[in-house]
Image (cartoon, coloured by chain):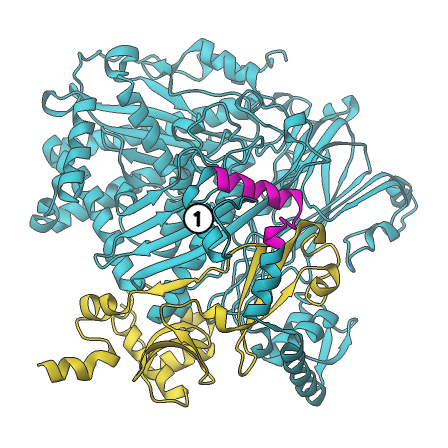
Amino acid sequence: MSKPESELHDPETTTRDREFNDVEPPIGWDGQTLQEMLNESEHLLEETGHYRGLDELELKEQDPFQYEQMYSRLRGALVSARETALHVSASPIVREIGELCFQIYTPEGDSVAVSTGIIVHVHTGSLAIKYMIEEDYEHGRGIQPGDVFCNNDNDLGNVHTTDVHTFVPIFYEDELVAWADGVTHEIDIGGMTRGHDQIASTNRHEDGLYATCEKIGEDDKLYQDWRDRGQRGVRTPMYWDLDEKCRLAGCHMIREAIHEMIDEVGVETFKQFLYEAVEEGREIMESRVKERMFPGTYREAGFHPIQWEDKAWQPGAQQNMMNHLPVEMTIDGDGEMELDLEGATPPGPHPFNCAKGSMEGALWVYLTQSLLHDGKVNDGANYAVDTNYPEGSVVNPQDPERSYHTPWATIFSTYLAVSKCLSNGFFSRGFREEVITGYGEPGDALQGGGKLKDSVADAIPDALGDYWPVGPFDFSCQGLGASACRDGLDYGYAMFNPEADLGDVEEWEQTQWGLLQLSRRVKPNTAGHGKYRGGSGWEGLHTIMGSEDVSMYAFSIPTVTWSAAGMSGGYPGGTSYSVRVHDTDLAERAAADEPYPLDDQPVGSLEEQIEGEEVIRDQDGMFFPEEFENHDLLRYQTSGGPGWGDPLERPPAKLKEDIEEDIFTPDIVEQVYGVVGEYDADDRDFTVDEEATKQRRKEIREERAERTQSFEEFFEAERERVEESDWNDGVQYMYEGVFEQSDQWAEEFREFWNLDDAYSP
Amino acid sequence: MTDLDKHRVESLIEGELTWDEMRNDVLPDPKDPDRFEKTREVLQDRVDWDDPILVPLNDHLYVVGTDDGRVVRAECGEDLCEVDENWKRSCEVFVREDAEEFEELYEEYMHVDPDWAFELREWYCPECYELIDVDAVPVGYPVIKPFDPDIDTFYEEWQGRPAPDRESTETAAD
């Protein structure tokens, strides 16, 4: 790839002359090294149970106004940095969707405050800083005023490969007083395929460009060789360059805000404030648990199927796999939460491996949505939760050789189980409004890219080049699960970033030049059934125009199995499927002013609305990169959320609305909810037949009594299948792997089914 | 702080609150500290039996204190098991695993691939056939008990009072 001929890439246009005086180590507080500060911090927490041993928050108690003002000011500086710096970026992922975040850390790497945005990264930045401390960058690589560091190495502190951190150490006189960190989500990272959540990679060497806590600049300037590496290492050098400038600009804004604050309050007050804010975050988490949860032990499990026997490219990945993601949550009398994933599957030849830091980041982002809406959101919450992500498992591989490109699949399935654990607690305490049965998993709709034909490329600004990446954030709008007192939010939720939305089509079409959006519509029957239904998903249809060398793929979940069910009798939402139509007559239809397809509703009808040489209709919504020609069609969908409660308790009036709003079709409503009536589709008017509904609901209850079996009958039949390992190869992969991984889980399995010690699947 | 009176709690349980009421009066932090007790009172008034509800487990399932100890009881009055046991062992169950069974609930292509040996287990009250829970798990997966509440820790340490089924004992001891 040649270097783009644009002045945007001339370093002289984007840097300024500024020199800093070096400081001699130790650079920590009061003559300590950073390692000594970190050791002391860990020791005090272990000894006292309080962060830095603070059993009292003196500054907060003595001058609460100053304390709260400092926190608000710090948070304001972070939000301001984010809102300003995102305009430096050109990528719609950053500028339009807001997939960036800024945070500030103590010198020993504990987050103190965070901006708005994709806050899943807050804890991962902490791990990267601690890695630099423990590897003694202070005396080796050097940590100096004006330095810039970068990390996206997941094994050391990152969620997935395309999230890139920029760190700036903040000095005051000769001491490191804090770290600023900015993260953006890249649209491309130069991996083995196009896309920002790869599915084809099976090891690190296929993931793309990695920076391993690397020093990438000094005196506020990025090194030329680092800049060249980024420019030549990714498919989208312009977006990479501007995203990096966005992160750096934001970190520098934060540094200036902190210098101003210290000048006003004094450095000692600032230091005391940092520590107290973290301890307060820890205390708030514990008190929130006691306010909303019920002590005891909660158990749930998530599952992630990977149907790759006939799809994967690399021989070692050509198998069906299922990842097991069990969750046991314990709340003790002190309000301390313990999360244990004993029994998680081993890591595998896929990009869904999830570093411990990613799991911790995900816990953090989920807790901020469920327990900590308004507290001091920082690493204090992390210290209030005791976690076991078993070493050597898919949730903590401890192996940098693995691919970590798309750990989200593992995260989403795990935190569905966490969500149910928390919701059981909320329900028991009477906080029905806080219950969330789960969410539609935000798998990416489409990813990939292509090149514009010369004739079309002439019309596009030079700086973009002729390559167009595909990474829309349609997946930010899934159905949210139901609560215990209302339906889930329709097509409007993303677990990883509660602020995300899908952005304007027009904005995306200015990036994805060759990919046109033909339609979007509510997808009936995606919402999980229940007394309160889950939020609905939707489907879309794309075509390709004016392009060549186009490849596209989908990272979709749930696909061939569900990840988890609903709660209290609620069901999971519909799974996703895929339809691609190649060599179509779309161009001829357009020229002749004839109708073209807008959806696959009713299911199976898309191919009836278009002529195509090849139709690929797959129950698995996930497909590997595939070549596309102009006028080919791609249909995709997002997920619905799970439901709450027995569907027979859903009032017919609500089902009338559901039918009229395309949430459910009348046949499904009659079969599941027992609501019978006449639907005038043209006028969108459903009339409930009350008598027939009463009768149908009575019949369904009678059918339940007829078709169910006792637990003993179920147990005997199921146990026989266990003894014979009567399941498919993907489920066999799961049980075999878990038995190898965890003696404890294997023992519990044998005990449950009354199997002898020699049993293995 | 949110402060729901008993009538509001009833409306919450019935699912009758509008989004505006939820957003303005119910969802904000911090929460009303007596919500548990108010909820318990409302639920107690709704059931046809007098044994005290100790913990609501889901829409139709409670841990209840009885003269014979703590049990898991369905709303219809059916006692499923002792509190320490897994109540799913006392339920009637229907297992969906093939396409025909899935397509009673979902459209073609929008349910589990039947080749995947993955089940929907539907757990029903053996008395009234209310659907109490649904599990989505692979074949052979052990039946998990979702929640083991630590009842006395909650009442004594978090609420500062004995559990309702222990109140008379405590009083007698005093």
Q: Quadrant of residue A735?
A: top right
The residue that disc 1 covers is: A747
- Residue A696 on the magenta segment: no
Residue A275 lies left or right of residue B122; in this view the side is left
Write down the region rendered in magenta. Answer: A721-740
Q: Quadrant of residue A611?
A: top right
Q: Position of residue A631 (x, y in %)?
A: 82, 38
Amino acid type for the residue under numbered disc 1: Glu
Question: How many callouts does the rendering have?
Answer: 1
Q: Which chain is cyan?
A: A
Q: Quadrant of residue B49?
A: bottom left
Q: Relative to B172, say whether A207 is above or below.
A: above
Residue A356 visible, this orientation:
yes
Q: Nearer the viewer, residue A93 or A671?
A: A671
Quarter of the C terminus of chain A within the rendering: top right
Quarter of the N terminus of chain A within the rendering: top right
Q: Residue at 78% across / 71% down in the picture?
A: A681
Task: Tell me the chain of label 1.
Answer: A
Residue A500 visible, this orientation:
no
Q: Residue at 72% across / 37% down in the picture?
A: A515
Residue A384 lies left or right of residue A183; in this view the side is left
Secondary structure character of the magenta stretch overall: helix
Q: Position of residue B120 (x, y in %)?
A: 61, 61
Which type of secondary structure does the marked residue at label 1 adopt? helix
